[in-house]
Image (cartoon, grey):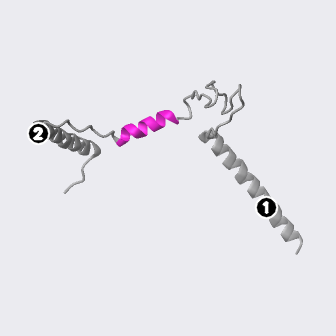
Amino acid sequence: MSKKTRQQKREEEARILAEMDKALEAQGLAPISKPIDKIEKEEKYKREYDDTMPQEIHCRRCKTLMENGKCPVCGHTIYVPMNKQKQRKIKWIATGIMLVVFAALFAILQMSK
């Protein structure tokens, strides 16, 4: 038995749902609604939280357009996650600082012997 591809699974799911809809309609009941596909949810999530796409966020208090997570009118702030490029830069800087500190400590310990 070979594994089914995603497309084959979707087609089988669509076929089963169509059969169920026909059976329900034959009994005089309303057809069931089709579930949202997981891939559609993932694409929607990517569109909403894409770092390259500018987001327009409105203040919860005064409904003004916020700038960098802070409202220019009332001063209300929200958490705005960092983009991946900035996270990567901070990780490299922190790693460099740790290496310099460890090297300095090693040198101090070697001199004290």
Residue wearing tag 2: 27
Residue 102 coordinates in the image, percent (x, y): 77, 62
Front residue of 92 and 33: 33
Q: Is residue 39 above or below residue 100?
A: above
The circle drawn on residue 51 is none
Q: Is residue 85 above or below residue 64?
A: below
Task: Describe residue 64's horizontal placement relative to residue 111 as left or right.
Answer: left
| Residue positioned 61% across, 25% down in the render | 63
Q: What amino acid does circle 2 point to?
A: Gln
Furthest residue in direction right, as rendered = 112
Q: Is 59 within the magenta? A: no
Furthest residue in direction front, as rendered = 28
The circle drawn on residue 103 is 1
Residue 52 coordinates in the image, percent (x, y): 56, 31
Mark 1 vs mark 2: give the one in front. Answer: 2
Q: Which quadrant would residue 53 be assigned to in this image?
A: top right
Instruction: State the quadrant of the N terminus.
Output: bottom left
